[in-house]
Amino acid sequence: MRHTRRIAAALVLTATAAFTAVGCGTEGGDQGGTGAGDDQQKVEPKDPTPPASEAGTPFEERAEAIEENWPDVAPTGSTGLEELQPVPAAEAAEDGAALTVTVGHGACDADWGVHVAESEDLVVLGGWREAGDAEACTEQLLTDEVTVELDERLGDRAVVDAATGESLVNPTLTK
């Protein structure tokens, strides 16, 4: 069952990148990344924190639904949260005060990062991206790591991907 969920999460991430990477980016910008065989310098997000938003955003609503239904959470599927990017991995810092989160984005995206919602029992993560303005772009998925500071130390809280509803189980998260 766990293997099937990981494959599903990987497929969602791949499909999301294929649909979102076309026609995005900054015109004439350096297109570095971490793709296979990519010798260019890694492109860093401008600011890994999501743009300021009002309460009741799709991410915040999804995080609340996850908290209410945990651990019986279904993937977003076709629920209108297409802008919510899957988060394939997260690792806790030694002291548990921060998470290093892997996020996917298109080669031409202007910016990307991760939404974070914390509760007593959970830390919910959801990737976000800001499309660029290039007229044409390759269909390429890049993954980069973003460090997010937690309001409270991770402790025993589960870390959950908002898009898939899956726990991001990683031995480093159980420290």
Image (spheres, rainbow, N blue to C red):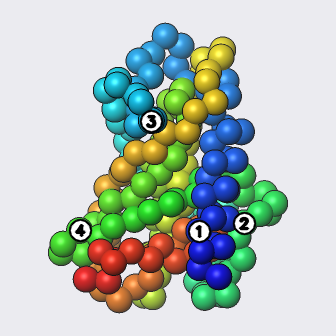
Between the residue at mark 1 and the residue at mark 3, the CA separation in whole angstroms equals: 21 Å
Neighbor class of circle 3 (other Cα within 10 Å; few <14, some 14-19, many 20+) is few
Q: Write the residue at 33% across / 78% down.
A: 171
Mark 2 or 3, closer to the camera: 3
Q: Amino acid at mark 2?
A: Thr
Q: Amino acid at mark 4?
A: Ala
Q: What residue did someone put label 2 on?
A: 76
From this view, report whether residue 175 is shown above or below residue 19: below
Quadrant including the N terminus: bottom right
Outermost residue, right side: 78
Mark 2 / mark 3, whichever is N-terminal = 3
Q: Write the residue at 33% across / 67% down.
A: 91
Residue 140, image x, y percentages:
58, 33
Q: Amino acid at mark 3?
A: Ala
Q: Amino acid at mark 1?
A: Arg
Q: Can residue 50 be seen at all in this image of the molecule?
A: no
Q: Secondary structure at mark 2?
A: loop
Q: Write the residue at 66% across / 14% down.
A: 135
From this view, report whether residue 136 is shown above or below residue 3: above
- The numbered disc on residue 36 is 3
Q: Secondary structure at mark 3?
A: loop
Q: What residue did someone put label 1 on?
A: 6
